[in-house]
Image: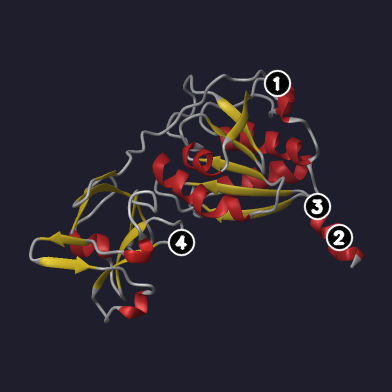
Amino acid sequence: MLEEEALSALPLITLTTDFGDQDGFVGAMKGVILSINPEARIVDISHAVPRQDVRAGAMVLRGACPYFPEGTVHVAVIDPGVGSSRAAVVVETALAFYVLPDNGLITLIDQITPVRHVYAIEQAGLCLPDVSRTFHGRDIFAPVAAHLSRGLPPNQVGPPMQSFAELDVPAAVVDDHRVEGHVLYVDVFGNCITNIGPEQVNFGAFDWRWRSGDREVAGLKTSYAEATWGEALMIQSSNGCLELAVNGGNAAEMFGLKVGDLLVLYR
């Protein structure tokens, strides 16, 4: 029991990037973290976020971060604006800390656990010397996360910010006979996750249908296996929103769908 209690008290840091695993970028970040806090536990959420796709990164954070213990430090680096005037920030919610560029990555987390405070990272002594213009993940985000995991108060990284960058996430539009939504994310299986949630449709009494050309998908399945092999279906995804999928197949490829595409339901 004592060992379990000690383990649970060890600081936890997660990493989410678009770096892939071919180069040494992720390893460099981990090396910096462990040099500052050798006791840190580092968990990789994903390093396969599509390159420079901030919206996809926001979806990955939303899908994973809420399930980590309170006090976790989450580092996210999907940063097409690296080296520009965009701020590097620490975001504090009721449950966790996020160390990331101020480019909208926090948008979907804010919808689940509202942001309490945002601080611009301006305390140079917390970063590596000679910060590069191309690798803030190693030089800024990793060392700041390590210091936070050692107990540094987030307000010590720099001044508070009154606002933060948010992605333009369209809201689904609904009336009695029509729902207009959009594809927010396409996962590795080709499932298309939309912005149509329980606020727009009743998943308990779902009587909507979707049509693409001569194909029609009607009703809601409770599992992929309810559909025959190769059959398209609608299901409530693990994040609570409507998902278009194909049992054993790829809905994005079957219907030619991509992020941002309009998806209209009828009844």
State which mark lies toward you, 2 or 4.
Answer: 4
Q: Distance between the residues labelled 2 and 1?
A: 33 Å
State which mark lies toward you, 2 or 1.
Answer: 2
Q: Distance between the residues labelled 3 and 4?
A: 29 Å
> Residue 86: percent from the left, percent from the top?
49, 23
Query: Closest to the observer: 245 or 195?
Result: 195
Name the residue beneath numbered marker 2: 5
Q: Which amino acid does label 1 sit on?
A: Gln
Q: Which amino acid does label 3 sit on?
A: Leu
Q: Distance between the residues labelled 2 and 3?
A: 9 Å
| Pointers 3 and 4 in contact (C-beta within 8 Å) | no
Name which residue lies at 69% across and 38% down: 145
Quick one: quadrant of the N terminus? bottom right
Q: In this view, does 202 lie above or below 183?
A: below
Task: Answer with mark 2 or mark 3, whichever residue precedes in sequence.
Answer: 2
Name the residue beneath numbered marker 1: 123
| Pointers 1 and 4 in contact (C-beta within 8 Å) | no
